Amino acid sequence: MTLSQNSTNMLRKLLEVVAGFSELATIRFGPTAMRLQTMDISHVCLVDICLPDSWFETYKCVSHVEMSTSLRMLVKMLGCIESGQRAWLREVDTKLGHGWELELSGGEGTFTKTFGIPQYDLEGELLELPDNDAHVDFVMNAARWAKTIDELAIFGPVLNVTCGDDGTTLHTEETTQNTKMTCLIGMDDVASYDASDDTFTVYFPIAMIQQASAARHAACLGPVAAVTVHVTEERPIDMVFDLGNGAESRFIVAPRTDAD
């Protein structure tokens, strides 16, 4: 698998976000795509990343293979890339058996750098993700979504989401300081909006949503990247970030039982 410098930087930013939920993870490579799925230690947020072969500069994988490693360490390795270089991820044979290495090479006036990627024995199968059969679905600019979530997080730890057929209202408040913020995402603020006739309210830990929203930095579409948000009463919020070329990162955050 080969990545250009631009896609290497995007992958590094994406893995950095995922490492905030779970430092160790298994990356699965298939003939047509790379897949990473993990969950935070409290089992509040499920992360699912799918990068098709079209997202890479070159991609070749004959059979299904897995790499279980430290995402934080992989982020540090990818951060060593220099201008004009490319990243090569390969399976290798080592003294300990099957392994992986990362090579950063190319670029005028640069050094070729090779890293041995640490391997761990991790258990776990891919989870079957729920269908996006939500009561409310809307698509909006990912940067604008992330900025709004950052602002709301200043004023309280719990995100109150009220959905209706005329828009979605986001609300946070800090009871000890008696401060609060409310933001209406109306029909004219989004690229598309689809909702049922019922109005409902659901609560989420805003820190998890804020952390997931940093995935927008990994989009090759830059400032015009989109996020699709699916909200259903008494069910997790499902955020899907468009990473370009058919790639997407999906974050499913479980709701809180109440507003406290």
Image (cartoon, rainbow, N blue to C red):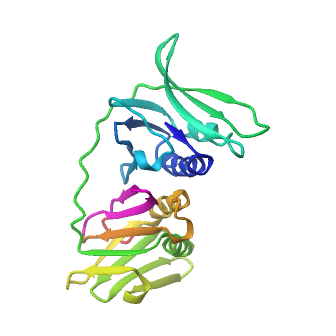
* Residue drawn at 42 percent across, 72 percent down: 159
Q: Does the magenta stretch include residue 238?
A: yes
Residue farthest along the right direction in this orientation: 109
* Residue drawn at 42 percent across, 49 percent down: 54
In the rendered view, would you say 232 is above or below 65?
A: below
Left or right: 230 as drawn, with respect to 12: left
* Residue drawn at 79 percent across, 37 percent down: 109
Could you say which is closer to the camera, residue 120 or residue 249? 249
Q: How many labels does the image show?
A: 0
Q: Main secondary structure of the magenta part?
A: strand
Q: Can residue 194 be seen in this view?
A: yes
Instruction: Residue 20 in the image: state x and y as whole percent.
Output: 52, 49
Q: Can residue 40 be seen in this view?
A: no
Instruction: Residue 58 in the image: state x and y as whole percent.
Output: 48, 40
Q: Is residue 150 magenta?
A: no
Q: Quadrant of the rendered structure where residue 98 is?
A: top left
- Write the start and end of the magenta stretch as one range: 234-256
Instruction: Residue 252 in the image: state x and y as whole percent.
Output: 35, 58
Q: Quadrant of the C terminus?
A: bottom left
Residue farthest along the top direction in this orientation: 95
Could you say which is closer to the camera, residue 49 or residue 203? 49
Could you say which is closer to the camera, residue 176 or residue 200? 200
Q: Quadrant of the rendered structure where residue 63 is?
A: top left
Instruction: Residue 85 in the image: state x and y as whole percent.
Output: 67, 41
